[in-house]
Amino acid sequence: MTDEQALSARDLQDAREAPGGSSTTSGGDRRARRPRIASLDLVRGLMLVATVVLGSLLATPEWIDHATWASVHPADTLFPVFVTLSGCGLAFALRRGVRFGVLIRRTLVLLAAGLLYSAILSGSWALDTWRVTGVLQIYAVVVAVLGLLHLVTRSWRGWAVVTALFAVAHTVLLSGWAERCVGGVLTRECNPSGAIDVLVFSAAHIYQHGGAGHDPEGLVASLGALVSASAGMTVGHLLLSVRRRSLDRSAGVGTAVLPLIALAAAFLAAAFVLTWAPTLLGAQPVPMMKRLWSPPFALALASATTIALLLGHLLVDRAGTGRVIRGLSYPILALGRNSLLVYFGSHVLMGLLTRPLPDGSIPAETIATTVAVAGHVQATWTGLLLLFWILLTSLLHRHRLYLRP
């Protein structure tokens, strides 16, 4: 845990997700701190509500659970949205520059935490089968790569180019690899992850010990995650640019509408183009799928996330937000401020509670049945978990305590 009040002056500025620490008023003789952009916290918080709800399911329907291969189910969207929003947050945090010591520390902490996270969820500490890939490891890659690329560009146009380069590179990899597969279609038996991730890490150290034929959090998927994160960077820098201009001109949040809608449309158009562009060369379309984190999938979600951020911006970033909205949004904003804690903490908690005990019972089911109200086992259990995370993050937010690597 980090106490925001104990951060250095520069850390505190970087933690505030607004363009610049101050602005000159029309009179030119006063400097006023620009307000925090709360829409990122709001959308993060809503994403975390969905994460806790889906993670709380004692029996997950097949149509909600992760798709087995080339399709997208609701559970497949949560982590990519988290990564996209993380890219947006990194745009805010790194706008003043990159500090290599902090960047290296965060990357190493995330990698170490990822190894621990994998061991806890698998329940195994055997070194010969310890999974070295995972969601936190992808997050570490995203933080490191985006931090380094921030030395090259800090504009939304520059990050739009970076996003396009990552998306094209990943599309070429997937489409080119599909040409060696039967019918030109990527399958669990024929895909780049099944070869590259096994070659680099060995089958014993990847998802399902290589039995799934791919790793949804391996190197190939990391390239797709970089598409999502770079798209988030683009949104973040565009939002900063629009906010800067609107404050300088004393304009309202409505100035963000057209730019963000245009960017969302561009992401969606790019997803369509990258899906069908390979067919011009006689290849199969690139599927929209999470298992290999395909560019069409990443960009389509980035488009939806951009619209969500715009709606949040119009709701909570405008001047004179009413008491009702502030009160209703407070618990959601508190969740969003501690997104790393809630996202990964909720998975660890449910991973432990759904692990069978020696007598065969499952703690989560036992607790849920015991506390059920009027026989509504699932609804009561989900409500209790949501209440727990909201109360915890609200308390931490009140004391300005946030989990950061």
Image (cartoon, rainbow, N blue to C red):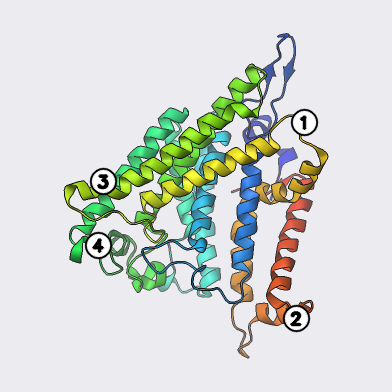
Mark with earlier residue (2, 4)? 4
Q: Position of residue 256 (x, y in %)?
A: 57, 30
Helix or strand or loop: what does disc 4 sit on?
loop
- Residue flagged by tag 2: what amino acid is it? Gly
Residue 343 shown left or right of residue 402 in the figure: left
Q: Earlier in the sequence, mark 2 or mark 3?
A: 3
Looking at the image, is mark 1 or mark 2 earlier in the sequence?
A: 1
Which label number is shown at residue 320? 1
Residue bearing mark 4: 185
User: Which residue is drawn at the image coordinates 52% and 34% (left, top)?
Assistant: 260
Are discs 2 and 4 less than 8 Å apart at CB? no
Residue 282 relative to residue 148: left or right: left
Dot 3 corresponds to which residue? 277
> Where is residue 333 shown, x and y percent of the image?
70, 46
Q: Are marks 1 and 2 in contact (CB under 8 Å)?
A: no
Q: Distance between the residues labelled 3 and 1?
A: 47 Å
Within 10 angstroms of label 2, few (less than 14), some, or many (20 or more) residues?
few
